[in-house]
Amino acid sequence: MRQVIAPTGLWRDGRLHGGQELVIEGDRLVAIRPRSDAPAREVALITPLLSDLQVNGGGGVMVNDTPTPEGLRAIAAAHRKLGTGDILPTVITDAPEVAEAAADAVLACHGDTGILGLHIEGPHLAPARRGTHAARFLRPLDRRSVALVERLRGQGVAVMITLAPELADPALLAALVECGAVVSAGHSAASHDEAQAAFARGVTCVTHLFNAMDPMTSRAPGLLGAAIESEIACGLICDGIHVSWPMLRIALRARPRAGLCFAVSDAMATVGGPDHFMLYGAQIQVQDGRLINAEGALAGAHVSLRDCLVNLMQHVGLPPAEAIPMVTDIPRRLMGLAPRNIAVGMPVRDLLILERGV
């Protein structure tokens, strides 16, 4: 079966193209050409599948509860159905054996389409900014965690590790940087000076900007202020719950240049799955789009990266040419990975097609 699709915008080769059409035969893209008079299905946008650097779960599965190759593949499959082609499975604060099992699972999946590497979020966090992470598992950065990251990097696996840099032993932090991990500041009470010192030592990212860090005030900009004014990459949960739309607009406008922010879902098991799951033995429930624990506090996000893309355009007001790289090229560049692209011969399943109305 042959069909022609005419997008208003086509993200290809790192920029947005207009006036193009895609010809599909069966399950393959067979031509990309200027818009013709041929009957076509008109859509808003076509992009490569998205890349999400913070995925705690999906399809009813959590990385921490099922740190196995089968668990990671199930999570990746759930997100692929929602337009995300590649994920960085995220293991949150837990016993050391859980992170090590997740690392083993990633090594077993290395090379699989859809699994980029591993994001280790905790347990080396500031207790005052731990959020939903269990206090009983928090501990300072130690040689055991560094060895785990070094083992993954030695096998060519992309690694992001989120920690509170103000609490990290400088020599151990340097070892993480030296092995090529992306060290990200998060769940941190760092002052502005401490944050700048961490950036100078090789911290190249900030995890879920605004969340799990001190608020910025007139005399204490903290990690938040240091990140916004820096050239450091910053992740943002773009669900309108973790950060309001006005604050997202303010942060994006305040950055030194474009290309420094990327969107993450921070997705939990409910994305593509049931409306509840267990975390540290307690039930987390979706309520009005929010993931709430028994105390009524936020516990991760119930949003897909595709939803984040639409939110950036609809609610934040970004033009597609600015929003699309935040869920495609920018996160991959941060991890040292080539961008996904759209090319003749590729499977149609590797396209994200957004209909009218975005």
Image: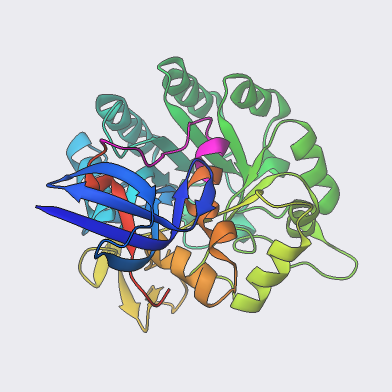
Q: Is residue 326 above or below residue 249?
A: above
Name the residue: 31% across, 74% down.
285
Image quadrant holding the C terminus, namely bottom left
The image quadrant of residue 271 is: bottom left
Residue 265 rendering spot, x and y as whole percentages: 43, 59
**Residue 240 shows up from this direction:** no
Q: Is residue 45 above or below residue 257?
A: below
Residue 333 rendering spot, x and y as whole percentages: 55, 37
Name the residue: 32% across, 68% down.
42
Q: Quick one: 298 or 109, which is closer to the camera? A: 109
Give the residue furthest to the right: 219
Q: Tell me if 102 is positioned left or right of 170 in this view.
A: left
Q: Quick one: 284 or 43, which is closer to the camera? A: 43
Q: Tell me if 205 is positioned left or right of 293 in this view.
A: right
Specify whether residue 187 is painted magenta.
no
Q: Tell me if 138 is positioned left or right of 58 in this view.
A: right
Name the residue: 67% across, 38% down.
204
Specify whether residue 334 is painted magenta.
yes
Residue 66 rendering spot, x and y as whole percentages: 23, 45
**Residue 351 shows up from this direction:** yes
Predominant SS of the magenta segment: loop
Q: Is residue 59 above or below residue 180?
A: below
| Range covered by the magenta-colored residues | 331-345
Q: Tell me if 188 is positioned left or right of 135 in this view.
A: right
Residue 72 rendering spot, x and y as whole percentages: 25, 42
Give the residue furthest to the top: 154
Name the residue: 83% across, 70% down.
217
